[in-house]
Structure formats: C-alpha cells, structure tokens
Image (cartoon, helix red, strand yellow):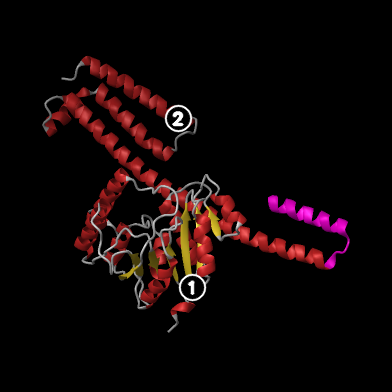
C-alpha cells in the first residue's frame, strides 16, 4: 500500500503542476506543442495519486515490491525521456544559431565589399564632374553618413 | 589538364585574439605567396585583431560573436565554396604553418585526392613525447576503423577539394578535426599526406594544455571508435 502522506503529497504536487503549466500557457511562455507533454504528465500523476490501485496494479504486473517504487520509476523514465528530448532540441537550436551567425558574417562580408566599391566610384564621379569645392565636401559628407547608416 | 599553378586556392586562417601574430603571418602570405588567396576568420576577438585586419586591409570575415574554431572554419569553407575555389585549406594564424608546402599539397591533390594533410611525419620520424603518444593513439583508432594509416592526424594543415569542401561547408559535425577525416575516409574520400614541417608559434600560449590535450584525445578516440559507426556516410562525388 502507498502511504497516505505520499498520496497527499502526490495529489498536491500534480495539482500544482497542472495549474503552473496552464498559467505558463496563458502567459504565452510555453508553446502548446511543448506544453502537451507536461499536461499529460501532471494528469498522469493526478490519476496515480487519486487512484493508487493503478499503481498497485502496475507494481504487481512488473514485479515491484511496493507501489511507490513503481511510481518513482515511472517518473524517472518520464523525466529521462524529456531530458533527452531537450538535449536534441538544444543541439538543433545550437546548430541553427551557428548557421545564422555564419550567414550573417558572410552577408556582412559581401555588403562590405559592395559598399566599398560603390563609395569608390561615387567619389571618383565627384572628382571628375564637380569643380566647386563646397558642393564636393557636402556630397562626400552625405556619402559618409549613408555608409554609417 | 590544368596546371597546379592555375588552380584557385583559398587559405582559411581562423584567428581568435591573434593580435601578436596575425600581421606577420598575413604579410608573409601576401609578399611571398601572392598566388594564393586567403581569408582571415576573426572569431569575435576581444583584442586588437579586428583593428589590425581593418588597418592593413586584410581580406577577412568578422564573426559577430565568438563561435569557436569549428564554426569559424566552416564559415571559411562556405566562403570558399561560394566563390568557386578549387582547393581550400586551414592555416593557423599563429605562425606555426609554413606556406612553402602548399604547392606540394596542391600537386598532390591534382593526382585525384580529396583531402591532403600537411604532415610532420611522412619523411621524418615521430618523436616520443606525451603529445605524440596521444597522436599515436588517434592514429591507431583511425587505422582500426578505416584501415588507412594517417601519420599526423592532428595536423591542422588540411586541404580539401570541391567535393569535400561542399560537405565540410554544409553538414553538421564536420569540424576540422581527425574524426572528420576518419569519417570522410569511411565515406570513400581519398586522403594523402605530404611532408610539411612546422615552426614554433611566434607568441602567445597554446590553447592545448595537458588536461585539455587528454580531454581532446579521449573525445577524438570515442568519436572515431564508437560514434563513427552510427553516422550516416556522406556522398563523395567522383568526376
């Protein structure tokens, strides 16, 4: 038999888990896709704590000495599966982040070459066509400011 | 047949906080080996590397943040592939590598190899030190899994052709390390080693201290001996 204390703790914890998950979804801090796992897990916990017979049945089926061991093993497995999923997601996220940084660096490189070439031809044009020095400086000022932008 | 002189070669020089060495290394390349193009990958250096590159108008790419060697070199591979280079190679920014051997490496590649390693131990014998012991273990691991003997698997001087360049540029987990070479050999890439002596680094501390070396060696061995088997082989195109 599972002790009454464990049952009470389980009921409280699973209730809190459900409430916490739903609140996070409400605040849009958790994707619904990711939230489904946690809702299912907390509902499962709730069922186990309200109907301990299910834990006893499972423990008997798999040959556990006590139902509480069964509950703990089930929870550890669930956590391990989720942990692995998170590791996979993190790997993908790292890869995508690196890819973005690489694309950004390469793009910066290309635009840098282009702006330098544009600037060169622009100033050459100024020197060949403009004789008035005041206009010349004002044009080069604007050219400088556009590059900074 | 195109002469090896006409081949477009891009030298990728990863640089992280290399203000003491980079100027010397690039000046050497620009004055003595103008036939090769180079690109410096400035991996978010916090020292004056960026200013030196900018002031001297060295061809470079700035990584917006520090991303690590593998990701930086991969950016160089992408650049080389996009700009139609025939061969690309990694070249250390700390002055250890000697560009005099690049010509030999290009000639070797012309014989139809996919990867050429600038190796310290083709003609000269491997000295017996702790680090070379690690090198021997990695060599043995590659021998066991691929059947090929790579005498200097940890050499950073590796040249790639269009085929392997494309794979290096576009795939996950193809860092510039021995396990990538082993995996490419298993995928069918042909590898050759060319004698290339290396110099002492000009200034600064090497990244690899004792514990890092051990960790690196274990990581490489695990990757070559075990992870290798479940990796999907890449497709090596033959012209």
Q: Which residues are the magenta region?
A: A129-149
Secondary structure under tag 1 reads loop
Residue count near mark 2 (Cα–Cα under 10 Å), binned few <14, some 14–19, many ≥20: some
Q: Is residue B92 visible?
A: yes
Q: Main secondary structure of the magenta part?
A: helix
Quarter of the view holding residue A33: top left
Q: Position of residue B15 (x, y in %)?
A: 48, 53
On whether residue B236 falls in the magenta region, the answer is no
Number of numbered discs on residues: 2
Q: Position of residue B37 (x, y in %)?
A: 51, 67
Q: Chain letter for mark 2, please.
A: A
Secondary structure under tag 2 reads helix
Q: Do the residues at pointers 2 and 1 share their chain?
A: no
The residue that label 1 is drawn on is B8
Q: Position of residue A139 (x, y in %)?
A: 81, 56
- A129 vs B83, left or right, is right
- Single out the mark in the foreground, 2 or 1: 1
**Residue at horizontal 47%, vertical 59%?**
B13
Quarter of the view holding residue A82: top left
The residue that label 2 is drawn on is A24
C-alpha span from label 2 to label 1? 56 Å
**Residue at horizontal 36%, vertical 55%?**
B173
Instruction: Check the image and name the residue furthest to the bottom.
Output: B1
């Amino acid at each position: 038999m599972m002790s009454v204390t464990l049952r009470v703790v389980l009921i409280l914890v699973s209730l809190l888990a459900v409430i916490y998950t739903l609140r996070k979804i409400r605040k849009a801090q958790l994707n619904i896709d990711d939230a489904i796992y946690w809702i299912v897990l907390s509902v499962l916990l709730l069922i186990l704590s309200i109907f301990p017979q299910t834990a006893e049945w499972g423990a008997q089926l798999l040959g556990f000495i006590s139902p509480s061991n069964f509950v703990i093993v089930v929870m550890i497995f669930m956590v391990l599966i989720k942990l692995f999923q998170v590791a996979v997601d993190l790997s993908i996220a790292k890869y995508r982040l690196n890819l973005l940084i690489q694309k950004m660096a390469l793009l910066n490189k290309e635009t840098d070459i282009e702006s330098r070439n544009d600037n060169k031809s622009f100033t050459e044009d100024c020197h060949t066509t403009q004789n008035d020095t005041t206009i010349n400086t004002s044009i080069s000022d604007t050219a400088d400011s556009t590059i900074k932008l | 047949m195109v002469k090896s002189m006409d081949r477009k070669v891009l030298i990728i020089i990863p640089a992280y906080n290399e203000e003491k060495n980079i100027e010397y290394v690039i000046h050497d390349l620009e004055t003595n080996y103008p036939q090769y193009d180079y690109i410096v990958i400035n991996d978010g250096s916090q020292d004056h590397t960026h200013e030196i590159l900018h002031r001297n108008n060295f061809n470079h790419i700035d990584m917006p943040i520090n991303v690590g060697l593998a990701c930086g070199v991969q950016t160089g591979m992408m650049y080389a592939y996009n700009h139609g280079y025939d061969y690309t190679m990694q070249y250390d920014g700390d002055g250890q590598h000697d560009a005099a051997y690049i010509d030999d490496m290009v000639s070797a590649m012309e014989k139809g190899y996919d990867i050429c390693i600038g190796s310290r131990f083709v003609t000269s014998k491997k000295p017996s030190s702790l680090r070379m012991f690690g090198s021997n273990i990695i060599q043995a691991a590659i021998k066991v899994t691929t059947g090929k003997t790579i005498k200097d698997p940890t050499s950073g001087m590796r040249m790639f052709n269009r085929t392997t360049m494309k794979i290096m540029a576009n795939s996950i987990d193809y860092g510039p390390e021995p396990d990538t070479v082993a995996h490419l050999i298993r995928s069918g890439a042909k590898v050759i080693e060319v004698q290339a002596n290396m110099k002492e680094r000009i200034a600064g501390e090497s990244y690899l201290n004792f514990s890092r070396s051990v960790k690196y060696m274990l990581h490489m061995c695990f990757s070559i001996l075990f992870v290798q088997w479940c990796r999907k082989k890449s497709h090596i195109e033959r012209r």
